[in-house]
Every structure is written in structure tokens, then in C-alpha cells.
Image (cartoon, rainbow, N blue to C red):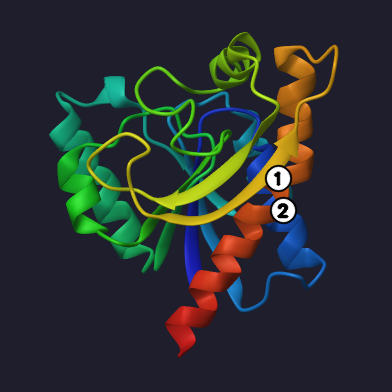
Amino acid sequence: MLKIAVMVSGGGTNLQAIIDAIDNGTLKDVSIETVVSNKPDAYALTRAASHGITSKCFSVKDYDNKEEYGRHLATYLKDMKIDLVVLAGFLVVLPKNFIDEFEGRIINIHPSLIPSFCGDGFYGLKVHEAALERGVKVTGATVHYVDAGTDTGPIIMQKAVYIEDGDTPETLQRRVMEQAEWIILPAAIQKIQKEKDI
């Protein structure tokens, strides 16, 4: 069983995709041990509670510095015996001490085809606004391992989504979630689970 922690800042639609994949049997031998948010009012925490999943809020402002934040977060996840940390719309740049503690065991979903529209400042709607401004015809989503850079870790999986005439950042965001993110995030977790079992 691959024990995962899902870290989210907002609504938790990618968390829901993972929960649904476990519930319908497409994601096997994976258990969500905890959901972590940096915001106490994140709807993702409500999703976790409604599925009986332990959840916890770690707000950066409750700690003296990022290193202390990273240390407390790492201790919590180690106590939960977490195998894999899944960043699913987690809008905090994790400190180096946390990344070092879970090296090779943190993945992130990003709403573009990396290396396009990624790095500092590219998150949420900003990614889709940039894609539309640039006039690209294809965008998508990427699941990648997290390293010390921003969206620079090794790519695990990508899925393309075509941009349609009349797309707004909001319609594009929704289609990228439905056609790419919600599919490849559970698939990437399953791939890692299978590799762990080998």
C-alpha cells in the first residue's frame, strides 16, 4: 500500500480526482493518509472530512520562518509514515529542508506542458492567461517530481489539451483539469505505486 499525503491550498478538485479514482478502483493499493492545507478555510479540508480522511492545516504565518515550517510539516508526515507527498494545487513554495527530507518522494501537478508556462509566478489562472496571450494551440498538464527549483524536477507524465476558439482563461482551466489533470495525477500515482512494489 502506497501511503500518500495530498497537499492543497484551495478547492481540492485534484484531491477529489484521486479520491474518486481510489473509490472506483482505477487507483489501486493507494491510501490517502492525510490532507494538508496552508489555509484553514480551504474547501479541500471539507472534502477530506466528508471522506473520513485526516486533515491538518499548516499555515506558514504560524511559524517564525520557512525552515521551522518545513521541519514541523516533515515531522507530521514522517509520523504518518507517508511514502509520497502529492502537491495538488499547493501554493506554498516548500523550503529546502522539507524537500531534502522527502527527496524523490514529492510530486506536483502543473497546468501546462512543462517547460512552457512554468516557474515563478505561473500558477492557477495565470498559466492559462499566458497560454492564451501567447497564442499557443496546444496546452495541457504535467506531473513532475519536485526538486529545489520551481517546476524544474523530472517529468513523470504529460497530457495535451487543444485550445479552442473563444477560450477564456476560465474555460481553458476547466478543460485542462477535466481532460488532463484529473486523469494524469491518479495515473502518475499508480505508476509510482507499481514501481515501489517491484
Disc 1 marks a residue whose amino acid type is Ala
> Mark 2 touching mark 1, by CB under 8 A?
yes
Q: Considering only vertical position in the picture, is 51 above or below 38? A: below
Rendered position, 148 above or below 156: above
- Residue in the picture at 51% in, 30% down: 9
Instruction: Identify residue type, mark 2.
Output: Ile
Tell me if 113 is positioned left or right of 64 in this view: right
Asked whether the viewer can see residue 181, the reply is no
Q: Is residue 81 left or right of residue 163?
A: left
Instruction: Give x and y (percent) for residue 115.
Output: 43, 36
Residue 141: percent from the left, percent from the top?
60, 41
Distance of label 2 from label 1 (alpha carbons): 5 Å
* Residue, disc 1: 180
> Which residue bears the numbered disc 2?
183
Q: Secondary structure at mark 1?
A: helix
Q: Looking at the picture, how far across and down is residue 55, in whole percent?
A: 52, 46
Residue at the far bottom in the pictured view:
198
Residue at image location 26% in from the left, 51% down from the top: 74
Report the front residue among 150 and 73: 150
Q: Quadrant of residue 190?
A: bottom right
Q: Is residue 123 left or right of residue 58?
A: right
Task: Provide the secondary structure element on which disc 2 rests.
Answer: helix
Report whether residue 17 is seen.
yes
Residue 124's quadrant in the figure? top right
Q: Residues within 10 Å of mark 1 (few under 14, many from 20)?
A: many
